[in-house]
Image (spheres, rainbow, N blue to C red):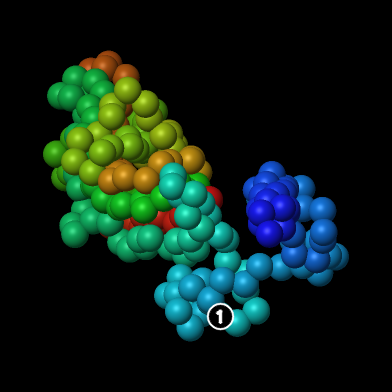
Amino acid sequence: MNKFLLLTFLAIFTVTGNWAQKGVGIGTTNPQAALHISGNNASIRIDGLNSTNNTKNSGGSSMYNVMVDADGNLKLAEISGELASSESFSSPQILQTGADASANSSELYAETFTLTQRAFVTITYYISMEFDNYDGSAKLMDGGAKVAHNYWYLGNGVTPDTTKKYGMKSTVYSNSDCDTASGFIFNSRSVTLPLSAGNYSIHLNGTVDGGGLTSDAAFRVTFGDMDRLDISVMYF
């Protein structure tokens, strides 16, 4: 009786030890990992990730990315797409050069957004510009070059990091006493960059520059009679 119990114990220990070392095999008797599913059409089904039980799964024929968190839990990724798309300015913004036509810069608009996980973020803006003399009483006729820049800073949801400019776009305008076409001039740029989860802000800026020559070269630009700022994400 004692020998039978000893043999039974050894047999159980051997099976348990082999299982612990090799793992669990489905479709294989020789698992090569803690869980090994063998077969050309093998798959794993998790009901908690299906369209019935998970709002991040919209169903249909689309495929959805499964991510792993810091604890090793499998979860569906956030749905990629458009975070914001709207006209930016509640009213046009006027920016003048210095009285001597020197450069002058100012923030024109800010937009905040939040990422719940890592993502590629694409920021696209377009903004209209209208050039006039310094006090806005007349169109420019001096034939001098007038420069207007647009760019944006990335912020933490409140404060911009002004050490790096993104999306720089410039227009050089010149006009003398002649017939001209009517309508707006536009700056537009699109930038994609990877960002971690967190709160962010886009701070769109403008700069006007007449070269710092004389007061006669001073001018103003009206930004944003027509404008748009789009923010879209692709989570990964």
Name the residue: 85% across, 65% down: 40
Dot 1 falls on a residue whose secondary structure is: loop
Quadrant of the rendered image containing residue 166: top left
User: Is residue 134 shown to the viewer in this render?
Assistant: yes
Q: Position of residue 25 (x, y in %)?
A: 74, 59
Q: Position of residue 165 (x, y in %)?
A: 38, 30
Comparing 232 with 136, the one in front is 232
Is 38 rendered above or below residue 95? below
User: Is residue 210 shown to the viewer in this render?
Assistant: no
Is 202 rendered above or below residue 2? above
Q: Position of residue 19 (x, y in %)?
A: 69, 52
Position of 13 with respect to 140 (left or right) is right
Name the residue: 28% across, 29% down: 161
Where does label 1 land, which residue? 59
Location of the N terminus by quadrant is bottom right
Residue lying at the far right in this picture: please name it.
Answer: 40
Position of 193 with respect to 102 (left or right) is right
Name the residue: 26% across, 50% down: 112
Is 214 rendered above or below residue 182? above
Residue lying at the far front in this picture: please name it.
Answer: 1
Amino acid identity at mark 1: Gly
Around disc 1, counting alpha carbons within 10 Å, would you say few (fewer than 14), some (14 to 19), or many (20 or more)?
Answer: few
Comparing 43 with 35, the one in front is 35
Quadrant of the rendered image containing residue 200: top left
Badge count: 1
Q: Position of residue 183 (x, y in %)?
A: 39, 57
Name the residue: 71% across, 53% down: 3
